[in-house]
Image (cartoon, rainbow, N blue to C red):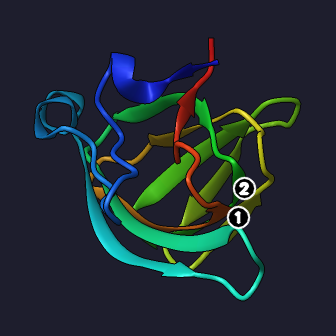
Amino acid sequence: MKCIRSIGAVLVAAGGLALTASYAQQSGFTRTDVLRHDLSVAGREVIQVRVDFEPGVAFPRHSHPGEEIAYVLEGTLEYELDGKPPITLKAGQALLIPAGVNHVARNVGTVKASELATYLVLKGKPLLLLAQ
C-alpha cells in the first residue's frame, strides 16, 4: 500500500490531520476535523472526522491502522469492504470497519451525504493508506 500522499497529503504531525483542500474540492467531498485525543491504551488514539460527500462521489479504496466506526449523519452511503457484499446505510445507522480492511465509501443518493468517522488507531501512523 502507498500513503495517500499521492492524491493529497495526510498530515499526522503536530496534532494536525487534514487532506489538501485541492483534492477535497476536486473530489466532491470535504473532511472536517472534530476530535483527536490519546486513549488509555498506550500507543493508541481516537480521531473523529466529519466527511461530507456530494451525490455520486466515492472516497478511493483505502484502509486505516485501527478500527473505524462510520456513523451516517445524513443521506445514504454505500460501503464496500474487501471480501464482503456492499452495505448501504442511511442517517442514524453505523458500521464497524476492522483495522487494515480496504474499503470504499460512496454517496449513492441524490443529495449530500455525511458521516462521522471515528478512528481508534495506532498513534503516529498515517491515518489513511490507499490500496494498490
Q: Horizontally, is 74 left or right of 124 in the view? A: left
Residue 66 marker: 2
Marks 1, 2: nearer the viewer? 2
Outermost residue to the top: 132
Q: Position of residue 61 (x, y in %)?
A: 57, 27
x then y, percent, for residue 64 = 64, 45
Residue 21 at what x, y percent from top left?
13, 40
Residue 131, by quadrant, is top right
Which residue does the numbered mark 1 point to in the structure image? 95
Q: Is residue 27 rendered to the left or right of residue 124?
A: left
Disc 1 element? strand
Label 1 crowding class (10 Å Cα cut-off): few <14, some 14-19, many 20+? some
Q: Residue furthest right?
A: 83
Q: Is residue 79 visible?
A: yes
Looking at this rendering, what residue extends furthest in the bottom direction?
A: 40
- Which amino acid type is shown beneath numbered disc 1? Leu
The image position of residue 33, as x and y in percent, is: 30, 68
Secondary-structure class at tag 2:
strand
**In the rendered image, which quarter contains the N terminus?**
top right
Residue 24 - label: none
Name the amino acid, label 2.
Gly
Residue 123 versus residue 107: which sits nearer the camera?
123
Q: How many discs appear?
A: 2
Residue shown at the point (60%, 72%) measured from the top left: 45
Residue at 68 percent of width and 36 percent of height: 80
